[in-house]
Image: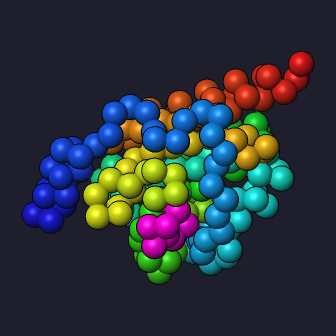
Amino acid sequence: MKRIVYALLAALFAAPASAALKNGAPAPVFTTQASLGGKEFTFSLTEALKAGPVVLYFYPKAFTSGCTEEAHMFAEAMDQFKALGATVIGISKDKIETLNRFSVEACQNKFPVGADDGTIIKSYDAALLFSYANRTSFVIAPDGNIIYSYTALSPDQHVANTMDAVKRWRAGQKG
């Protein structure tokens, strides 16, 4: 019942198909406790950007159907993201203990998920309701600027859209 109420509220308050932080805006810098393959570590956006673009995606709650589906889709695409030099991280308000399991079961040990108290979510204008994250994806160039943003409650297009944005960025770097 709780999931149904949450889904209805999320649908009522869902943002249009673009995130509040626009292309060209500087990405808020953050460091957070994260988990990859059930192992905790500190994720730093600044450090990740030194290796290439970062796909930062926000999702409402681990182990809900849409969030699990989205994590599976990102996991399946990780080889392609890595080939393009991109790092992927998911962020939610879940506790790190929950994310330890989610990083193994849903993310299939392929990419990290970070815990947030709502601070990172708010800094990216990605809040949905009660500081839970809206389903919002960003691609951040190594210079720290947002080059792509997308908000849609359905997880269906987030992986494909961010992949296309990373490919366009990468193609522009070869000139």
| Left or right of 130, for residue 2 | left
Which segment is the magenta one? 114-120
State whether residue 42 appears in this view. yes
In-image side of 53 versus 30 (left or right): right
- Name the quarter where the N terminus is drawn: bottom left
- Residue 134, horizontal then vertical, whole percent: 37, 50
Q: Residue furthest bottom?
A: 97
The C terminus lies in which quarter of the figure?
Answer: top right
The reply to whether the magenta stretch includes residue 115 is yes
The residue lying at 79 percent from left, 43 percent from top is 143
Foreground of the two, 105 or 25: 25
**Identity of the residue drawn at 46% across and 41% down:** 20
Q: Could you tell me residue 48's position as x and y percent?
A: 75, 57
Would residue 79 be visible to someone looking at this image? Answer: no
Q: Quadrant of residue 168?
A: top right
Residue at image x 52%, y 42%?
A: 21
Where residue 99 sits: x, y (%)?
Answer: 48, 71
Indicate yes or no whether the magenta region holds residue 28. no
- Relative depth, front residue between 81 and 23: 23
Q: Is residue 13 left or right of residue 166?
A: left
Where 111 falls versus 140 (above or below)?
A: below
> Is the image coloured rainbow, by chain, by secondary structure, or in one colour?
rainbow
What residue do we see at 41% from left, 71% from top? 94
Residue 105 percent location from the top left of the image? 47, 64
Query: Who is closer to the viewer here, 55 or 64?
Result: 55
